[in-house]
Amino acid sequence: MTEPAVPLRLFIAVNPPPEVRERLGLLLRRLKFPLARAGITRAKAAQIQLPLKFLADVPADAAGDLAAAIRRGSKGIPPFTLRGETLGVFPGGRKPRVIWAGVGGELEVLRRLQEGVERETGCWRAPERGNFART
């Protein structure tokens, strides 16, 4: 009897180019001390991403189907340019847990990408308790 595969915790995200990640990483390094005082762990530059959708526990054997759905959802989306515009924290300034960067630029193309990915992966949902379900 084989052990069941460990589910994968997945995000669908846009990965910024390495130079953008590096610049954001430099900014985070400058903020290291204030972040540590606030109890925020600084992300590595390689972990910086623009999330489009969160999926909780995805069975490992479903990853191929999910990847195909993402490819369908992003088909026809041209390369686009975004720029960083703002920084903020979540949930609030008193006890921040996440630093976010707001973007500007070709937001219409980004919106079309997000809508296409959502349309093609809409049957994949992340239930409250972390049990993955495909409807």
Image: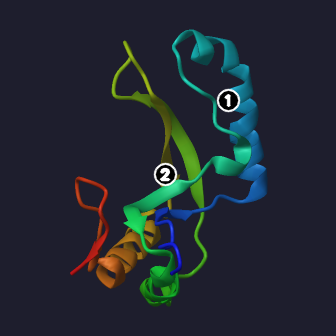
Question: In this orientation, does residue 70 appear?
Answer: no
Tell me the quadrant of the picture where the C terminus can be found: bottom left
**Vertical placement of 37 versus 66: above or below?**
above
Residue 89 lies, in percent from the top left, at: 43, 28
**Residue type, label 1:** Leu
Q: Position of residue 92 (x, y in %)?
A: 34, 22
Marks 2 and 1, how far apart at CA:
20 Å
Front one among 78 and 99: 99
Q: Residue furthest front?
A: 1
What x and y, as percent, mark residue 9? 47, 60
Q: Foreground residue, 106 or 14? A: 14
Classify 115 as above or below 45. Answer: below
Instruction: Identify the disc placed on residue 28.
Output: 1
Number of numbered markers: 2
Circle 2 residues within 10 Å: few <14, some 14–19, many ≥20: few
Residue at image point 51% right, 81% down: 1
Q: Is residue 49 visible?
A: yes
What residue is drawn where x is 54% and y is 23%?
40
Q: Quadrant of residue 88?
A: top left
Instruction: Tell me if 131 is positioned left or right of 47 in this view.
Output: left
Specify the label residue 104 is tagged with. Answer: 2
Percent position (x, y) of residue 73? 42, 84
Of helix, strand and loop, which one carries label 2? strand
Identify the residue at image location x=77%, y=44%. 22
Q: Mark 2–mark 1 contact, CB under 8 Å?
A: no
- Taking 125 as reference, is 50 above or below it? above
Q: Residue at x 39, y 77 (%)?
A: 117
Of helix, strand and loop, which one carries label 1?
helix
